[in-house]
Amino acid sequence: MSDHLFDAHEGQTPLTAEEREGLIPSHVTLRGELNELEQQNILEANAWALARKRNVFAEPFGRNLHRRMFAKVWQWAGRYRESDKNIGTEWWRIPSRIPEVLDEAQFWTAHSTYPPDEIAVRFHHALVLIHPYANGNGRWSRLMADLLAVRLDRPLFTWGSADLRAPSDMRQTYLDALHAADAHDLEPLIAFARS
């Protein structure tokens, strides 16, 4: 496994040259260093997001959350991507697709369309399908789902962290669960979220 800074592994979104130029810390040369900086930023954003109730259905909140998660690492944090990727909605559809997903999740919540965990996991999956940012979509959409779970009086998801398998195995389990959800089978993703 390469530790080159911009190598994209399975399930990761490759960055354009312009997006790579948005890296703020100039001393970062290895993927592990980048991951560590992003994780520090994400931990701060988690604390901020979980400190009080948040309106996850407000489009500006989602952008602000992404910005808080990655602003110390990427200049484009909190801004929708402006290039197409190997996955996700065409970039120019993002500004209309995000409000649609937020409205759907708000409807599911107001009408108890699904059990609470399923609502939050469906929300996560719908956001991942859009892939609105150049990077960090999975982490951002998992935190959005966590915040919705809390709003629904459910505990935070563990997203596989209780499993003792190797991180690469857990990542593959997560990707497999996302693919199952693409085919309308949410059970593996719900199980993974609570594992």
Image: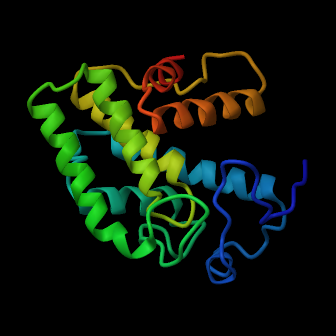
The quarter holding residue 33 reads bottom right
Name the side, left or right, on which 126 lies relative to 77.
left
Task: Please name the residue shown 42% across and 26% down the image.
Answer: 186
Nearer to me, 93 or 134: 93
Task: Please name the residue shown 55% across and 37% down the image.
Answer: 179
Name the side, left or right, on which 190 lies relative to 59.
right
Task: Please name the residue shown 51% across and 21% down the image.
Answer: 188
Q: Which residue lies furthest to the left in this view?
A: 111
Q: Which residue lies furthest to the right in this view?
A: 1
Q: Which residue lies furthest to the front in this view?
A: 183
Q: Is residue 10 above or below residue 70?
A: above
Nearer to me, 183 or 158: 183
Across and down, in percent, residue 50 comes to: 34, 38
Nearer to me, 41 or 11: 11
Q: Is residue 141 above or below residue 99?
A: above
State which quarter of the image contains the C terminus: top right
Nearer to me, 48 or 192: 192
Name the side, left or right, on which 57 lies relative to 158.
left
Task: Please name the residue shown 79% across and 52% down the image.
Answer: 32
